[in-house]
Image (tube, rainbow, N blue to C red):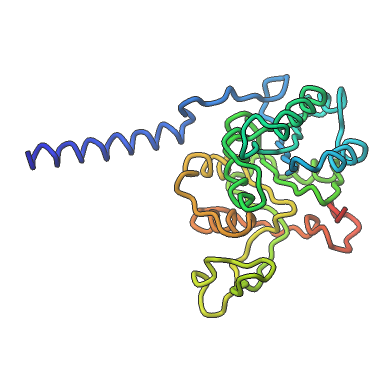
């Protein structure tokens, strides 16, 4: 029996290794059909704009400014750029919050709804895992871009920035920063896992959460390993922690610093 159990354990380990390899090659259970551009080429970018149930007015402001809508949104996709508002589901599945999002999406067709994610402030750090995982399964793109809904974008400037980096694997791009870890419960930006960051209580270098960009292989890594990736109190810290153990190239581009005074920056505080 002991020998039989050891053999079974060995076979389980082998199967787990084969499963990991299969996932890394794109053979995922219930994998969504990937879409590229209408020409069959890989997309340049998928841009996910975080939104919430109560942010319809803000979405309409975006649709009337930097974000195309209707036919213009489809034409942008023909150029290789997909933009979607990203939202999860209500804790009470199927309630009026979910129904209103579904109704709006039937009209605008500009949402990426994360079916497995509960849309709530306390769940925000986990949203990055669901966004990158869902986006990389659904669309074949060079880059996956997470954008907060409190900034404005120079869309053409961002497209130009990404186009010049086309084909660059392992790219982790953003406005890189660090900062103090807040260990006092009740204060803004409190980090429950503050003790993990050492005596100096300082975060590692990471891209600001307002606008951060991952190349395809890094988004695939999140998708494959999402179940075991630790989420911290903030989504940008979480993504930064996942990138630390990888052969990723940190690209600090201050054109992505929304509070910068640079004339050629591609984002600004709304």
Q: Quadrant of residue 84?
A: top right
Q: Which image quadrant is residue 107 in?
A: top right
Residue positioned 84% across, 52% down in the render: 267
- Which one is nearer the viewer's eye here, 29 or 161? 29
Which quarter of the picture shows residue 163? top right
Q: Residue at the location (55% across, 66% down)? A: 192
* Quadrant of the snapshot with the N terminus: top left
Q: Is residue 16 above or below residue 73?
A: below
Residue 108 in the figure: left or right of residue 29: right
**Is residue 150 shown left or right of residue 181?**
right
In this view, 83 is above or below 168: above
**Residue shown at the point (77%, 30%) measured from the top left:** 110
**Whole-percent x, y for residue 71 in the image:** 87, 22
Q: Which of 264 and 64 is in front in this view?
A: 64
- State whether residue 25 is above or below residue 198: above
Q: In this view, does 64 lie to the left or right of 122?
A: right
Residue shown at 87% from the left, 26% from the top: 72
Q: Position of residue 76 (x, y in %)?
A: 82, 29
| Residue 220 in picture, x, y percent from top left | 54, 39
Badge count: 0
Q: In this view, does 1 lie above or below 195?
A: above
Viewer-closest of 234 and 65: 234
């Amino acid at each position: 029996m002991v020998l039989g159990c050891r053999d079974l354990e060995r076979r389980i380990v082998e199967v787990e290794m084969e499963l990991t390899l299969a996932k890394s090659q794109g053979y995922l259970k219930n994998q969504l059909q990937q879409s590229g551009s209408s020409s069959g080429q890989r997309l340049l970018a998928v841009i996910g704009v975080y939104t919430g149930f109560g942010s319809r007015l803000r979405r309409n402001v975006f649709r009337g400014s930097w974000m195309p809508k209707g036919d213009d949104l489809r034409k942008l996709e023909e150029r290789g750029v997909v933009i979607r508002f990203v939202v999860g589901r209500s804790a009470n599945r199927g309630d009026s919050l979910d129904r209103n999002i579904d109704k709006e999406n039937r009209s605008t067709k500009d949402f990426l709804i994360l079916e497995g994610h509960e849309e709530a402030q306390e769940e925000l750090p986990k949203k990055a895992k669901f966004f990158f995982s869902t986006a990389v399964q659904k669309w074949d793109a060079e880059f996956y871009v997470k954008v907060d809904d409190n900034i404005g974008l120079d869309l053409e400037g961002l497209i130009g920035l990404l186009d010049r980096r086309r084909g660059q694997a392992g790219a982790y791009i953003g406005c890189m920063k660090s900062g103090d870890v807040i260990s006092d419960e009740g204060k803004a930006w409190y980090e429950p896992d503050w003790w993990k960051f050492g005596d100096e209580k300082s975060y590692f270098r990471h891209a600001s959460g307002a606008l951060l960009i991952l190349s395809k292989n890094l988004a695939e890594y999140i998708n494959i390993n999402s179940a075991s990736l630790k989420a911290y109190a903030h989504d940008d810290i979480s993504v930064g922690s996942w990138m630390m153990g990888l052969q990723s190239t940190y690209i600090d581009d201050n054109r992505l610093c929304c509070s910068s005074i640079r004339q050629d920056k591609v984002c600004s505080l709304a």
